[in-house]
Amino acid sequence: MSDPSPSTLKLFDLAGRVALVTGGSRGLGRAIAAGLAGAGARVAVAARGAVDANDGPAFAHEFFGVDLIDERARAGLVAKVAQKLGPVDILVHAAGQQHREPAENFPLARFREVLELHVNAGFDLAQQVVGGAGGMLARRHGKIIFISSVLGFEGGLMVPAYAAGKHAVLGMVKALANEWAPRGVNVNAIAPGYFATAMAVPVLTDPVRGPAIMARIPAGRAGKPEELVGAAVFLASEASNYVHGQSLVVDGGWLSR
């Protein structure tokens, strides 16, 4: 088989693009941010922590310490990135959190917090990145990627807030695609299955649920964070220009069982 032609490889080239990745300091967000940088993008990472470039990942061109659950803290974030790196071409909302507790005892405050981060913050940042004179809609170009989950299709156990939030993300992706696809902006989601990250450790190491989960995954193992990079680069690149409102599942075959 011959090597890919330069024109084919160029479809996935992100050189000259500016990407904002939330939750890009750890887990899946970090792997995605590093992957976009490896494909040539200039990457800004937004995550909890001190606003100090030395605290950010080595691959990040800019690091913004911000609590995305706080609406006031995330106000103007996209404008700050644009001031440093230029207009944002790619937004990846990968920031997330988890809380496991039986539904009858699940604290309403935690339920609101999880939805605020996964849904409200994502919608807020999407509005920020498409609006204004230098926004995606004005430029008629942009890629917005939400990180959902296989729990956007299922209910799971003891994660009512997470499941509700990830279902909402998938609906939001379709709604935004319907409005923004005709105006040059691609909105899509990636729905990971079980990956070996800190968020998944409690369930993957559970003596009962861990083996049951592994037995259901056709691939026979949890995913590695770097195995999400290909999907992210695809949806962030010119290769996905005709892909709108979709949820790309990366789950080792979990949903096929």
Image (cartoon, grey):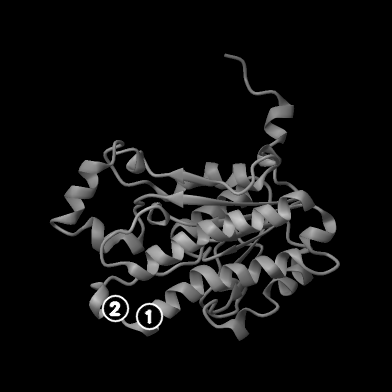
Q: Quadrant of the N terminus?
A: top right
x and y, in percent, of residue 216 in the image: 24, 42
Residue displayed at 43% across by 79% down: 112
Which secondary structure lies at badge 1? helix
Q: Quadrant of the C terminus?
A: top left
Q: Residues within 10 Å of mark 2 (few under 14, many from 20)?
A: some
x and y, in percent, of residue 247 in the image: 52, 48
**Which image quadrant is residue 76 in?**
bottom right
x and y, in percent, of residue 159 in the image: 31, 67
User: Is residue 58 rendered to the left or right of residue 256?
Assistant: right
Q: Which residue is mark 1?
A: 110
Comparing 61 with 77, the one in front is 77
- Are dots 2 and 1 in contact, CB under 8 Å? yes
**Is residue 145 in sight in this rendering?**
no
User: Is residue 87 rendered to the left or right of residue 169?
Assistant: right
Q: Which three-letter amino acid code belongs to the residue tagged 2?
A: Phe
Vertical relation: 35 (above or below) 133 = above
Give the Cα distance between marks 2 and 1.
7 Å
x and y, in percent, of residue 256 in the image: 34, 38
Q: Which residue is mark 2?
A: 106
Residue displayed at 28% across by 70% down: 100
Which secondary structure lies at badge 2? loop
Vertical relation: 77 (above or below) 197 = below
Residue displayed at 43% across by 59% down: 27
Comparing 242 with 213, the one in front is 242
Q: Which three-letter amino acid code belongs to the residue tagged 1?
A: Arg
User: Is residue 44 rendered to the left or right of residue 229?
Assistant: right
Residue displayed at 13% across by 57% down: 207
